Amino acid sequence: MYIRELKKTITSLHGVGKTLAESYANLGVSTISDLLLLAPRTYEDRSRIVPLGYVESGSYANTIVQVRSHHYFGGGRKRTLKVVVEDISGEGPGKASLLCFGRNFLERVFRIGSQFYLYGQFQRNFHELQSSQFEMLPLLPDGSMPNTFGALLPIYPLSGNLSQRIIRRDIAAALKLYGNFSEELPESIRTRNQLLPLNEALQNLHQPKTLADAQSAHHTLGFIELFYLLLMSRRKRSMQNQGKRAAPFVITQLQQQCIERLPFSLTSDQHKVLKEIGTEIAEDNPMNRLLQGDVGSGKTLIAWLSALQCIEAGGQVAFMAPTELLARQHAEMAAQWLEPLGIRLAFLTGSVTGKSRTLLLQALKEGQIDIIIGTHALFSAEVTFASLRYIIIDEQHRFGVVQRIALLEKGRTPDVLMMTATPIPRSLALTVFGDLNISTIRTMPEGRLPVTTYLVANESRQRMYRAIGVEFSRGHQAYFVYPRINDSGESTLRDVESMFKLLTNTMYPGIPAALIHSRLPEDEKVSILTRFRNKELAYLVSTSVVEVGIDIPNATCMVIEHAERFGLSALHQLRGRVGRSTLQSYCFLVYEQSLGDDARKRLRVMKESNDGFHIAEQDLLIRGPGEVAGTRQSGFLKLRFASLTEDFSCMEQAKIEVDAILESDPGLVDIANSTIREVLLKAPPFEEQRIDN
Ligand code: ADP
Ligand code: MG
């Protein structure tokens, strides 16, 4: 049996009922084959003992301990139990404190003198080793070890009621019942590329004995994945390449009108890119183009201008943004620039409902709307167009390579333009997106000053507050970004709600401000942003919801607290919210003294460079080859097993095989019936990778 033929639903497994099935569905798992192809995010290595004495700050201990004493710290509702344990593994010395936030009842469980297996992440705080995230399992009287001790544990993505324990249990059951699938790739390809037999790969994926086992499983499945991905995109290209060349592109009438109305002139890069896009739109072949340019470089305007070309030719345009907030901002922009030209605009997201939705969909179907702007709701089945010619996708790192191919497979293909501020190295792009062309805006609009970036140690924040106060007095605006929404008691991180109080009561009394985060209802977020745009608010206190795309040129200050916890691309995106006009802007990266090596490097890169391309390169360098399963890759380059940024050689090999097949024996591999093709096309749910959840 091929694995794709195993269509039994997961509810056929013992212990999986309706509720769990729903949780699994959120992970894209409905059949047993889906379950077997669920990739662990990473592995926890509990195969060796790491005694407390050898744990570095930020890393994990895995050992046996005895409880020595109990203490309490804090008062009132926040009174918290602290359990002091001592290492008795015999592998090394060590002592540590376990902080039991909200779990003071553990005093009875962790009795003094009792012994436990301990696994946890530790920090060195106030000269002692501490953990608030740990697992303790009692030593059993019969001396047997718990099955999580001494093992390599897969860590899966979670959703709803699922836990690691439940997923491991279900996968173990599935492997036991169905472990005997037929191979899909020809044997010659498997041996040439040192791939494991499929069944062994599945076994090693979920129950590896060593890290090397897990790695070779990921190599095998990743190779298969890249192989089919390349085969799909290259085959499509070789079918499309027969189109005719059109006449050289000239700026159209509507475009000219729009450009003349702008309060500024286009940069030469914007002109160049508009021409590249225009030329390809005019050709018979459907366009697949990536428009990359740093935050604030003026990509969106170019997208609108190129849309005009399609509309003049009688087509409709769909503009898709990653969030409702951004969709709305784009709609406002379009109204300002395009409506005066007589372009008919509409706005569609999940929150447009009832009668207005019905009418809108009707008008769209009858061709009475030229441009529709929205979220991925635009691609739901009920939305039909009179003649969709052009799809523009903003910030496409939220919209994967796979959805793009799914779109291409829908037959009559419109032109597609994807915009991103996260540049990818050209070689990588060409390898992966065989059919993708790239346009790049390198220069910023004239008069932009580079953002001045300050690294601010947590203790010396007063000067920063004063500097921002001065900006307020000039009528400029600011963002304050924190990693979490409220003080859930579990950590010392500063949060939006308490800092909002501090800022409004103590720092800037009388200056209007608002707090904004992802848990607010959509219309509230929109109204806050509108007030901010209208300068009714001087600053926003926020989580990283302001990360992508928000365009408020009068904002000149960006404060990012706990900057050491953000990745480089998030920091760059956040900083890109300022410096969007001719005003001098400032970015303050507030950090904790105990900086790890990588965090220190990231902050230095941010201080030294404003160049998104340079920052992206440094990002790859700092992150290095990464962990086993490419856990840190962005959604944009996300596949299930392979990491497009890390598995270069694997990709090269897959490419060689694919080219050979397309050249000599296109029928050798049955794409239509491959499991991986099904897996790939199963669009993974849109993911928001945030730290505020
Ligand atoms: P991106 O999408 O690349 O982040 P936007 O298209 O949102 O950038 O542009 C950022 C800001 O710069 C917007 O306020 C836009 O109106 C403005 N802008 C775009 N092109 C120019 C230009 N050539 N000169 C001056 N300002 C520009
Ligand atoms: Mg943008």
Image (tube, helix red, strand yellow):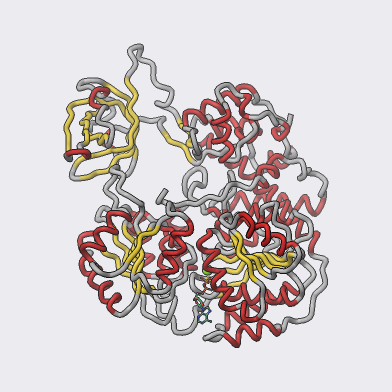
Q: Position of residue 652 (x, y in %)?
A: 64, 53
| Residue 488 coordinates in the image, percent (x, y) | 31, 44
Name the image quarter holding the N terminus. top right
| Residue 188 coordinates in the image, percent (x, y) | 74, 40
Position above or below: 65 against 689: above
- Residue drawn at 37 percent across, 72 percent down: 536
Q: Residue furthest front?
A: 355
- Total numbered labels: 0
Eyeballing the image, is 484 above or below 142? below
Up-down relation of residue 219 to residue 173 (above or below): below
Whether residue 604 is visible to the viewer of this picture, yes or no, is: no
Q: Nearer the viewer, residue 661 or 240?
A: 240
Which residue extends farthest top? Answer: 142
Tell which of 500 and 687 is nearer to you.
500
Compared across the picture, whether 639 is left or right of 435 comes to: left
Residue reaching furthest bottom? 260
Image quarter of residue 407: bottom right
Q: Can residue 301 be seen at all in this image of the molecule?
A: yes
Q: Which residue is drawn at the image coordinates 25% and 39% (left, top)?
A: 130
The image quarter containing residue 301 is bottom right
Find residue 145 and report its horizontal and vertical position in percent: 39, 20
Q: Would you say 198 lies left or right of 141 here? A: right
Task: Out of 280 and 311, give the one closest to the viewer.
Answer: 311
Query: Does residue 512 appear to the left or right of 147 in the view shown?
Result: left
In the displayed structure, would residue 642 be above or below residue 250?
above
